[in-house]
Amino acid sequence: MNILGIETSCDETAASVLYEGEIHSNVIASQAVHEAFGGVVPELASRAHHKTIWKTVKQSLDEAAVQMEAIDAIAVTQGPGLMGSLLVGLSFAKGLALSYNKPLIGVNHIDAHMYANFIEHDEVYPFVALIVSGGHTRLVYVNKIFNHKLLGDTRDDAAGEAFDKIGKILGLPYPAGPVVDKLAKEGNPAFHDFPRSMIKKGLDFSFSGLKTSVLYYTQEKGDAFVQENLNNICASASAAITDVLAAKLKRAVIKTGVKHVMLAGGVSANSMLRSKINSLSKKMGLHVMIPSIYYCTDNAAMIAKTGELMAREGLYDSLEIKPFARLKSV
Ligand code: KG4
Ligand code: ZN
């Protein structure tokens, strides 16, 4: 199966070619236009996708040295995401499918974050996935392919949102997650004891209290103190987030009895989280799957990979499919 994957759910225009089971190109055009606004501006995002999509798709085909004729199906993100951004990718994919007479596959972006793991790891079931992105924080039990059961969800902010909002409070540029990660590496995680919300209770998450706690702490201590201790504050806040994530994953493993676990989504690029999940897995004798950094954050290789799996299962779509902004179910 040769798949062209297209991803435009948020602020990355991305295209990838999966050729004979391998990723041959993974092109990502990031939109710098949002930096000045401290967050993604939906209208600007869809305009930028519109401008870049053809160039990005062409580049992915060129880098893979594959022509459209050799492609068996076009996989495109159908949702969740920003409606205007999704529409650009989906309309483009439909046009391409129609003109080259190729089947279309609408991919769920959150599923794709999970199945990105199977680019580099053998397919194994059942597993528990900890999905941590800018918009979602969920624990999902996957019994067999595309058979998902939601075990836990966030009640307020997603983990990536928590990193971004805490970074914003600390005056860091958007998206702050990777910057907080970098600063935290030189800091002391035990410098300040930020709250670990709901750590002892169930499988749901809540991160908005932590954000408020960081806000009050920085207001009380003042700018000079914050600047002087930026590394320590980043490390302490990261420790609070990642302790909760690791504790909940552990509880989900005990509850389901799985032997395989995976990390998925942008926050799985976080070094503290990766190391905590690796040591948890070692202690519990689990097989752990964590994507390489470039498959953690939004990319189209994960869309191509999920498209390949959907094609294998006969899950093709018609040209009538519509984008969806929010998750319907897992
Ligand atoms: O999966 P993703 O690329 O997009 C969504 O589907 O939301 O996730 C983006 C999120 C952002 O909140 C970003 O700050 C966070 O992932 N992120 C990180 C790191 N890299 C990306 N958070 C913490 N540490 C990182 N290294
Ligand atoms: Zn994503």
Image (cartoon, grey):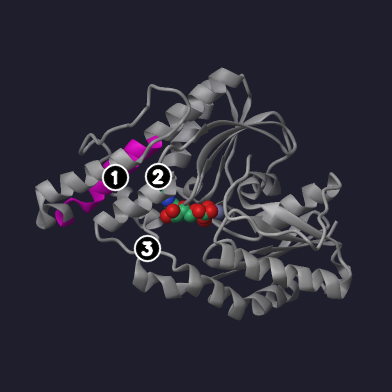
Question: From the viewer's perspective, is 160 left or right of 130?
Answer: left
Residue 240 sits inside the magenta stretch: yes
Q: Which residue is mark 3?
A: 174
Query: Which residue is more in the foreground, 70 or 157?
Result: 157
Q: Which residue is mark 2?
A: 157
The magenta segment is 227-242
Q: Is mark 1 within 8 Å of ligand 1?
A: no
Are the residues flagged by discs 1 and 2 in contact, CB closer than 8 Å?
A: yes
- C-alpha gap between disc 1 and disc 3: 16 Å
Q: Which residue is mark 1?
A: 211
Question: From the viewer's perspective, is 286 left or right of 226?
Answer: right
Crowd band around label 3 with a 10 angstrom C-alpha radius: few (<14), some (14–19), many (20+): some
Give the quadrant of the N terminus: bottom right
By secondary structure, the bulk of the magenta-drawn segment is best described as helix
Question: From the viewer's perspective, is 275 left or right of 56?
Answer: left
- C-alpha gap between disc 2 and disc 3: 16 Å
Q: Position of residue 143 (x, y in %)?
A: 71, 29
- Tag 2, which secondary structure? loop
Q: Amino acid at mark 2?
A: Asp
